[in-house]
Every structure is written in structure tokens, then in C-alpha cells.
Amino acid sequence: MIESWITQLRKGVVEYGVLLVLARGETYGYEVVRALKENRELAAGESTVYPILARLREEGYLTCRVVKGEAGPPRRYFLMTEKGRMRLAEMEAYWPTLEKGLERLRNASPDTLPPVRDDEGQPRGPSGGGRIPRMGDERAFWA
């Protein structure tokens, strides 16, 4: 079950990873895939990366040049534009904010979390809040 959540989480950060790879300079499309695959936590295949590269190019974040391959199909080389560098800078600036927000939620006591509400808008769970389970935590999570 956790695998589907991990897949969705990875999909959410692959664009960021692609731009981080391209920040090094012009890169062959497959090299972007390989760089992400080498990083197990961000492993993304061609079927994920190439559509992102195409979309980023269409949106003006990347340029692409095609070089005829010696023994195979043409190779597409991608280069980040100024707009792409700005996008990466925005992502870099936002990342600590995201981490801080998640950390605040992880460390929140039940009294500081907003109550979870049922379909009628009434608080549910102990005192309307709940505690965040930790790995190895044997206590049951509230229902």
C-alpha cells in the first residue's frame, strides 16, 4: 500500500529533480533519466521523465536541440532557459517552507492540531485532535 503513496510523492518532485540535473548544463535526455535512476529515492523512468521534459520545453523552461545519432535515433539535448533558472530558484526557495510545514505537523501536539471534523462538521477523535504515529510506535492511532 505504501508503494502507491511513494510513487505519487516521487511524481510530485520529479520536475524539481529534472531541473536540478539540468542546472549543471546542457544534458542529453537519457542522461537526465539516468541521473534520476542513480538516485534510488527519486528513481523515475523514461515514461515519467520524457513527458516532463516535453512539457517544460513547451512552457519555455527548456530549449532542445536535436543531434543526429551516429548509430541510432537523433538525440535531444536539453538546456535550461532563464525562465527555467527562475523556476528552479522558486522551487529552491519554496522547499524549506515545505519542510518546515511538514516538520511543524510532525511535531505538533494533539492540542495544537486543528480538529478533524466529520461530515456534519463536528470534531471527531480524542479532543477533536489526534497524535501523529511514529515508526515503531505500538500505540494505536485514533480513529
Image: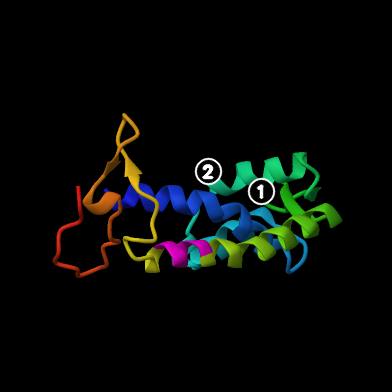
Tell me if residue 51 can be seen: yes
Category of crowding for the residue at label 2, using alpha-carbon neighbours closer than 10 angstroms: few (below 14), some (14–19), many (at least 20): few
Callout 1 touching callout 2 (CB < 8 Å)? no
Stretch in magenta: 101-105
Query: Looking at the rendered structure, which numbered label has been put on residue 47?
Result: 2
Residue ranking furthest to the right = 82
Amino acid type, residue under disc 2 in the picture: Ser
Residue 101 relative to residue 18: left or right: left
Place of residue 30 in the rendered image (x, y in percent of width and height, measured from the top left): 62, 55
First in sequence: mark 1 vs mark 2? 2
Q: Secondary structure at mark 1?
A: loop
Residue at 34 percent across and 61 percent down: it is 111
Please give the residue where the numbered disc 1 appears in the rendered image: 72
Query: Looking at the rendered structure, which numbered label has been put on residue 88?
Result: none
Amino acid type, residue under disc 1 in the picture: Gly
Place of residue 49 in the rendered image (x, y in percent of width and height, measured from the top left): 58, 49
Residue at 67 percent across and 65 percent down: it is 92
Q: Nearer the viewer, residue 21 or 86?
A: 86
Residue at 28 percent across and 60 percent down: it is 131
Residue at 70 percent across and 57 percent down: it is 28
Category of crowding for the residue at label 1, using alpha-carbon neighbours closer than 10 angstroms: few (below 14), some (14–19), many (at least 20): few
Does the stretch in magenta take in 83? no
Tell me if residue 45 can be seen: no
Q: Identify the image quadrant of residue 87.
A: bottom right
Instruction: Calculate the distance from the C-alpha at mark 1 to the C-alpha at mark 2.
Output: 19 Å
Q: Nearer the viewer, residue 130 or 43?
A: 130
Query: As displayed, is residue 112 above or below residue 118?
Result: below
